């Protein structure tokens, strides 16, 4: 395929993925916005005043970046895992794999859909946060770059889950037993400096901790983790998951029978 044909194929896959979740936005975009608004009300307005300051900031202001990042992570992941497994279940993906479309174009098409949904939900959640607290941005470059990198990473992770899933139940196992615990323990609601030294060391194994802290630095200018380490880990995971995803598509693992 020439470059123009590849771009057309990428546009077609991306457009299909975006239309897929925008058609049912009441089920895909609205629920996380409502859920996050409840977090703001319960943790920010009701519990926050009892907690007081967190690293020099009001508790509401402290948790806003983490809640935005949580919504981006879960929606980027959910969009790709459900879409890819649906294509595999209905055997649409086989048609693409035997077509002249390069595997990396197929991969980028699915990831673009996950990133679009993740960023759209992130923007909506950010808008809701303005109702509860003024928006203060320390570094827009850090904020935007980290949220895009995080969305790409978990879109790739969702595709890998979709490849290995053998039933619709399988696409909920990783989000329920792995992604949700890592997200809640990723420093969204607290600073790891509050933890005993042993648990601080344990927390450093959680990759989400680095992304949440880097994103919080973009908002507030504070982080429990070195910013450059956060970028290094995020990019490293993206490269590893991209190569693994590409390998799975090339071999047709779990797809070709």
Image: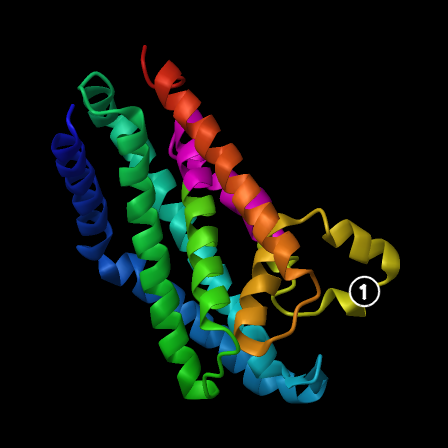
Q: Toward the viewer: 45 or 53?
A: 53
Secondary structure of residue under mark 1: loop
> Which residues lie in the magenta part?
156-182
Q: Residue 160 placed where, x, y %? A: 44, 32
Q: Is residue 86 magenta?
A: no
Q: Is residue 66 above or below residue 54?
A: above
Q: Nearer the viewer, residue 144 or 164?
A: 144
The crowding category of the residue bearing disc 1, from other C-alpha atoms within 10 Å (few below 14, some 14 to 19, many at least 20), is few
Q: Position of residue 235 (x, y in %)?
A: 53, 45
Going 36% across and 22% down the picture, which residue do you hit? 249
* Residue appearing at x 15%, y 39% in the figure: 12
- Which quadrant holds residue 158? top left
Question: Can residue 252 be seen at all in this image of the molecule?
Answer: no
Quadrant that contains the C terminus: top left
> Going by the image, does 32 lie left or right of 187?
left
Image coords of residue 173 (percent x, y): 51, 38
Please name the residue that numbered disc 1 is placed on: 195
Name which residue lies at 18% across and 19% down.
Answer: 100
Q: Is residue 230 above or below residue 87?
A: below
Q: Identify whether 180 is placed above or below 242.
A: below
Residue 51 location (% of width, % of height): 71, 83
Residue 5 in which image quadrant: top left
């Amino acid at each position: 395929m020439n470059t123009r044909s590849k771009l057309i194929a990428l546009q077609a896959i991306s457009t299909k993925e975006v239309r897929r979740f925008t058609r049912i936005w009441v089920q895909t975009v609205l629920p996380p916005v409502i859920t996050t608004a409840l977090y703001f009300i319960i943790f920010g307005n009701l519990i926050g005043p009892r907690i007081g300051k967190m690293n020099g900031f009001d508790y509401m202001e402290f948790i806003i970046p983490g809640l935005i990042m949580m919504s981006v992570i879960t929606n980027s992941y959910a969009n790709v895992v459900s879409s890819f497994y649906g294509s595999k279940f209905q055997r649409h993906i086989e048609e693409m794999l035997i077509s002249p479309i390069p595997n990396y174009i197929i991969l980028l098409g699915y990831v673009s859909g996950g990133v679009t949904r993740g960023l759209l939900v992130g923007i909506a959640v950010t808008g809701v946060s303005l109702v509860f607290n003024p928006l203060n941005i320390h570094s827009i470059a850090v904020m935007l770059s980290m949220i895009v990198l995080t969305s790409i990473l978990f879109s790739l992770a969702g595709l890998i889950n979709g490849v290995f899933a053998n039933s619709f139940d399988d696409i909920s196992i990783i989000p329920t037993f792995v992604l949700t615990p890592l997200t809640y323990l990723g420093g969204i609601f607290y600073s790891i400096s509050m933890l005993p030294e042993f648990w601080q060391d344990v927390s450093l194994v959680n990759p989400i901790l680095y992304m949440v802290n880097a994103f919080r630095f973009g908002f507030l200018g504070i982080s429990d983790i070195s910013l450059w380490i956060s970028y290094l880990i995020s990019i490293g995971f993206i490269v590893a998951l991209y190569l693994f995803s590409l390998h799975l598509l090339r071999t047709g693992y779990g797809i070709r029978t």
